[in-house]
């Protein structure tokens, strides 16, 4: 395997209620391959997870999947992965994804995506890393979350600098551009 920049993609194991979410996932997968980056993600073949991985592979990209044993038959594994890392626990899975990644892209997703997102951002706050992080805010999906972040800062339960740990892009292309700029 090569040492190209590795982008961790956090996203839903569901497709959402509108095809434009899947379309954004496809664009991220293709975009990562197009930049000659490598993708790491939770290995599932469902929803936005499967769509982004398949698109990256179809575009000639390298994709590493990380899956805990107990989820192998629930989330499945995308076919044609460059590498599949099996872990015993969810915590180990998150650790492998986090430590392998040079940057993070977050697509729309559910509670699992939120958990991964907030953990990565709070670790930045604690000074454990300085890895770039971009939200793909398809159709304003992340606005309620981003509003909550601003509210926390306003009410002084969070430093305002927290709001600078991430870039919010309305489109997948914008997120790719932001990560490219941050990595260069
Ligand atoms: P979701 O956004 O809920 O569709 O989940 C996206 C991914 O996050 C899936 O691979 C889930 O297995 C994973 N996930 C679900 N719950 C958690 C959790 N509590 N911590 C970390 N990852 C999770």
Image (tube, helix red, strand yellow):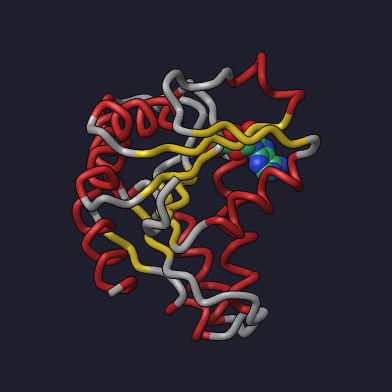
Q: In which quarter of the image is the N terminus?
A: top left
Q: Which residue lies furthest to the right in this view?
A: 88
Q: Which residue is drawn at 45% across and 18% down?
A: 79
Residue 65 left/right relative to 35: right
Q: Nearer the viewer, residue 10 or 32?
A: 32
Residue 100 drawn above or below residue 45: below
Residue 178 left/right relative to 86: left
Q: Which residue lies furthest to the top in this view?
A: 73
Q: Residue at x 24, y 31 (%)?
A: 23
Q: Quadrant of ligand 1?
A: top right
- Residue 83 location in percent, x, y? 52, 33
Q: Which residue is drawn at 74% across and 26% down?
A: 69
Q: In which quarter of the image is residue 144?
A: bottom left
Q: In which quarter of the image is the C terminus?
A: bottom left
Residue 156 left/right relative to 39: right
- Residue 131 location in percent, x, y? 48, 70
- Residue 78 location in percent, x, y? 47, 22
Q: In which quarter of the image is residue 3?
A: bottom left
- Residue 6 location in percent, x, y? 43, 54
Q: Which residue is drawn at 44% across and 62% down?
A: 103
Residue 63 drawn above or below residue 95: above
Residue 46 left/right relative to 180: right
Residue 73 drawn above or below residue 161: above
Q: Which of 181 and 114 is in front in this view?
A: 181
């Amino acid at each position: 395997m090569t040492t190209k920049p590795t982008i961790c993609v956090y996203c839903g194991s569901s497709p959402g209620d509108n095809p434009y979410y899947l379309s954004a996932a496809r664009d991220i997968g293709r975009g990562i391959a197009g930049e000659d980056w490598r993708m790491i993600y939770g290995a599932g073949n469902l929803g936005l997870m499967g769509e982004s991985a398949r698109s990256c592979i179809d575009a000639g990209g390298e994709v590493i999947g990380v899956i805990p044993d107990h989820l192998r038959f629930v989330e499945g594994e995308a076919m044609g992965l460059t590498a599949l890392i099996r872990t015993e626990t969810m915590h180990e899975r998150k650790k492998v994804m986090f430590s392998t990644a040079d940057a993070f892209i977050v697509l729309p997703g559910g509670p699992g995506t939120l958990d991964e997102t907030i953990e990565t951002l709070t670790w930045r706050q604690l000074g454990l890393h300085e890895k770039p992080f971009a939200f793909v805010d398809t159709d304003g999906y992340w606005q309620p979350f981003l509003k909550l972040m601003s509210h926390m800062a306003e009410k002084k339960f969070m430093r305002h600098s927290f709001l600078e740990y991430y870039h919010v892009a309305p489109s997948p292309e914008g997120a790719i551009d932001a990560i490219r700029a941050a990595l260069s």
